[in-house]
Amino acid sequence: MAEVQLDTPVQYVKGVGPVRAQQLAALGVATVEDLLTYFPRRFDLRRQTQPIQTLRGDESNATVAGTVEAVSENRFAQRPIFQCTLDDGTGFVLCKWFHAPYLRDAIKPGLVLAVSGKVSVYKETLQFIHPMHQVLYDADGKDLSKDELLPVYPAGGKLTSGIIARIVQKVLPQAAGLIRPWFDEAYLEKRGLMGRARAVVAMHRPEDKDEWSAARRRCAYDECFLMQMGVAMARVRAVSRPAYPLANSPEIDRRIRARFPFPMTPAQDRVVGEIVADLAGEHPANRLIQGDVGSGKTVVALYAALLAVANGKQAAIMAPTEILAAQHYEKIRAYLAGSRVRTELLVGGQTGGDRRDVLEGLADGSVNLVVGTHALLGEAVRFANLALVVVDEQHKFGVLQRTTIRGKGFAPHYLVMTATPIPRTLAMTVFGDLDVSTIDELPPGRGKTLTRCIDMSRLEEVWPFLGRKLDAGQQAYLIYPLVNPSPQLNLMAAQQAYDELQAGPLKKYRLGLIHGQMPAAAKDQVMADFRAGRLQALVASVVVEVGLDVAAANVMLVMHAERFGLAQLHQLRGRIGRGASDAVCILAATPRNPVAQKRLAVLEASNDGFQIAEEDLRLRGPGELFGTRQHGLPELKVADLVEDYELLRLARRDAWELLRDDPDLCAPHHQQLRREFLKMYGASMPLLGGA
């Protein structure tokens, strides 16, 4: 075939053409380089072939190759079947596939076919049922005398794994000449890594499993390395701008602490010390404050905000929902009652004079502290001297939103709060541009929370128990996965459940309904009634997932709990047990797969948010857990952030060391790395400050 380059459109690879190029594009394959890095998802072992006449009929795994003599298909049987007869000159064998209409265009008389699988005898005829098969277009040039690992590619549309394998094979022999080295031999030898070109080839055609493992390790390292370079560049650019230094003193510390009606825990004191040291600097602080539900992150964040105000500057606290923003605002107003600190709330629902007054106060500096939602990102919002931004529940905001709020002032210091404990691998990736502080203890005097899983069929046992708790003066959350019934999903919905419970098992109690589709004013009123005890139980969607704090709410029932993620269930459970009383969380579910069962078992066994977060990452992967795409990070094709943790640590150390010596990748021997970095990040580079 004609010479190709890595950026050659895949259409010009021999045997592709415009139509197949469109099919490949749907799989994300547009260039020769995309094709070379479209790796198999697994390998099947094809044993060396043997003559058909040597088959006994009881082999658990055998391979034969021969010419297709005849094909037949019965599309209308109860189990539609496609079959062919294979003859190698020593004998013949029948090959059968059920529910495989796609084979009628792939297997034709006259083709040479290799099949592997279990052998049996039916009516004195040797047969393979659902064998692995490989069309041998160049039978004479194929060595079938030894075992071979056959790649199985992620298929899609009209492209089977076999078709993709044949296309890849067209360009694989040229890979060694196309793929340039990223690192020198000494660098690779020190880290036990094989060369890049050899690794890419071995990812498709390894000699054995050991070579594939070594190739995978190299490709995973490369992905981790480029990701960590992106994280490091974001960090370097974020902290290179000037910021307002916020000085602390014993008098400021005393006045701030006097605002809280309780002493801080040792963990809160430690984190406050880390934040104070950050804020004293002339470059913006970048710190993640993580702590389990109820650990007192809001108090720590308010300390930092008041330190900014004490220095004559402004602070902003941004929450993901209006309910949570309003709750933060009310708590802060209570702490600051009688002080001269002007605190305002800015949310999307505000209009008219109230909104105008807040905007004017932010612009002229008379508003010292503002609490709000994404409304703080609006074009009309201008600050006089914003020195600190606190973002609550960071993973609910994308990178663009993070960047926008930071751009509102003169390089403000930046704190992130999250009650979803960050697994260590995600702390190094999604939040890798932040320093991490952990509040790892709860305030004293908290009750314990017991979690129990029950089958949905046992719900009738729950209502009397719930009634006894409500009669004793406690309050309850009843959580449902949907707001309204869905014809596609056989799930109970909050609105329907509210109506049925009011007329049924909970009719003697004062119930409220809250969900994300309600107007903000209506949600605020329901929450106010629940906090004041005017409502005994709250039927809710996951709008209550974060931040709500009602001390008397010590019972929670989560319906269809198998529909929720582990971290989300832990967040929901964190809404109860926030006072001195013990709490009970009931997870009603009918899990139909092992992963869902494992999730629920983890929650029954542990209240440790960090352990739960690690398990959630293991079960669901980083993409689903935090949405890595929204954070401007590249999608990983090879690396696994759980299994490759040590490799990620190595790549992180190497990337940060390299950028310390050459922060803009200007050195001649780093030009290939620079090209690869820009290729991988593409459109997200503006978010990282350019390169």
Image: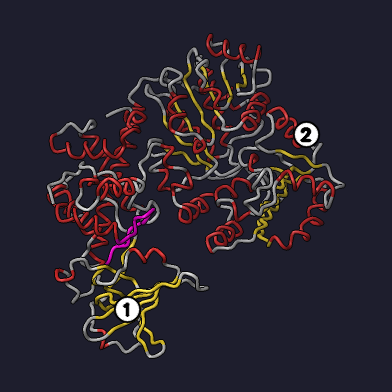
Question: In the displayed structure, would residue 322 be above or below residue 499?
Answer: above
Which of the 4 image quarters holds residue 368? top right
Q: Are marks 2 and 1 in contact (CB under 8 Å)?
A: no
Residue nearest the observer in this picture, 642 or 111: 111
Q: Residue 420, position in %: x, y?
A: 53, 44
Q: Amino acid at mark 1?
A: Thr
Q: Name the residue rendered at 33%, 50% in the picture.
A: 637
Q: Name the residue rendered at 46%, 69% in the picture.
A: 75
Residue at the extreme top of the image, as rendered:
364
Q: Residue 308, position in %: x, y?
A: 50, 20
Question: In the displayed structure, would residue 529 be above or below residue 102?
Answer: above
Q: Amino acid at mark 2?
A: Asp
Residue nearest the observer in this picture, 190 or 546: 546
Give yes or no for residue 232 being in the magenta stretch. Answer: no
Q: Name the residue rendered at 57%, 20% in the picture.
A: 369
Dominant SS in magenta:
loop
Q: Residue 519, position in %: x, y?
A: 69, 30
315 to the left or right of 556 = left
Judging by the rendered image, the residue that carries numbered circle 1 is 85
Give yes or no for residue 154 being in the magenta stretch. Answer: yes
Looking at the image, is mark 2 or mark 1 nearer the viewer?
Answer: 1
Residue at the extreme right of the image, as rendered:
508
Judging by the rendered image, the residue that carries numbered circle 2 is 529
Q: Name the residue rendered at 40%, 48% in the picture.
A: 425
Q: Residue 564, position in %: x, y?
A: 58, 51
Which of the 4 image quarters holds residue 121? bottom left
Residue range in magenta is 150-162
Q: Note whether residue 267 is visible.
A: yes
* Label 2: how many Cα within 10 Å (few below 14, some 14–19, many 20+): some
